[in-house]
Amino acid sequence: MQHIAIIGARGALGSDLMKVFRHGWQVTGFDLPELDVTNLNQLRRQLAAARPDVVINTAAYNLVREAETNRDAAFAVNDAGAANVANVARDLGAVCVHYGTDYVFDGETDHPYAETDAPRPLNVYGASKLAGEQRVLAASPRHLVLRTTGLYGETPTLTKGANFVQIVWKMARGKQEIALSDRETCSPTWTLELARQTRVLLEAGADGLFHAVQEGTCTWREFAQAILDIGGNAVVVKPKPSEADDTLKRPRYTALANARLHALDLNRMSHWRTALETFLKSEGGRQLRERTLG
């Protein structure tokens, strides 16, 4: 039985990875404070003791706006931390799985980005994530980088305190209509499906760069409307005008195409609306709603 170590095991994606690999793999989960990817000595010590065949790293500095004024913190985790994990995994003879982001692109297109499209990040967060994925891929040809976007699931994001689904539920409470921006188009992704896709790739012996998102595209406003519609909520989500004084540069269009997954017949990602409906009607989705709304 192969042994897998999951870094960030109590986070949104990490908790679903723990579930998905529980059967058929020996699994060890790590999270702060017992393992900090920026602490190389601690990382070496913990992973050497675990002796994994695969190391999955979900640790990330994902506060996009805060990264603009905390560049060193963002690069410490997303760049240097990612390299630490990749290099230690390589030295232990293990495969490293790392998660990238759609924000490595500038959004100046009208079609979903494939793995072969050239990245051009617009902000510090995107730049730090691009630097990290490049260092992971340079560390070993066996390593795996999965770019994804718009994650939501049963476990809230630890750093943000809530995922987008929860935010929409809270915004709509007691309202007849709410407003959200129609400016950004992406491919919102359920963490459980991403975790399952990760296992498919590992068991197929895949390596290199992949995009792994739900199929199809939508704006955040369209996604919010689907969340409410599927849940039987009559609240209308109106388009919100862009804020002229917002100085943070965000890409307009960051939908990703699972091109390599399709080419290798390994794609297991459903359409974004199908995944959302399955999640919202699942036991975990219902429990999250009860915890969010009381």
Image (cartoon, helix red, strand yellow):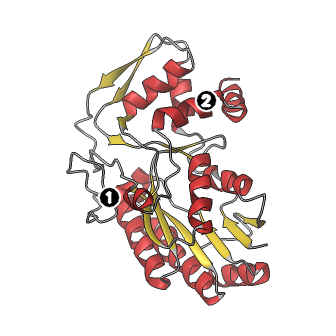
At label 2, the amino acid type is: Leu
Residue 280's disc number = 2
The residue under the point 36% across, 56% down is 103
Tell me if residue 5 comes above or below residue 23 in the rendering.
below
Q: How crowded is mark 2: few (under 14 residues within 10 Å), some or many (20 or more)?
A: many
Residue 171 visible in the displayed image: no
Q: What whole-number distance in Å separates the C-alpha atoms at marks 1 and 2?
A: 29 Å
Tag 2, which secondary structure? helix
Outermost residue, front direction? 265
Taking the image as shown, residue 88 lies to the left or right of residue 64, namely right
Residue 106's disc number = none
Q: In which quarter of the image is the N terminus?
A: bottom right
Front of the two marks 1 and 2 = 1
* Residue on which the image places disc 1: 114
Q: Of 53 and 9, which appears nearest the observer?
A: 53
Q: Residue 87 is drawn in which quadrant? A: bottom right
Residue 142 visible in the displayed image: yes
Taking the image as shown, residue 111 lies to the left or right of residue 215, namely left
Q: Of 166 and 6, which appears nearest the observer?
A: 6
Numbered marks: total: 2
Q: Residue 138 is drawn in which quadrant? A: bottom left
Could you say where residue 83 lies in the image, as x and y percent from the top left?
51, 79
Tell me if residue 157 comes above or below residue 52 in the rendering.
above
Q: Which of marks 1 and 2 is nearer the N terminus?
A: 1
Tag 1, which secondary structure? loop
Outermost residue, bottom direction? 91
Could you say where residue 198 lies in the image, as x and y percent from the top left?
58, 60
Tell me if residue 136 comes above or below residue 203 in the rendering.
below
At label 1, the amino acid type is: Ala
Could you say where residue 20 lies in the image, as x and y percent from the top left?
70, 54
Could you say where residue 291 lies in the image, as x and y percent from the top left?
71, 30
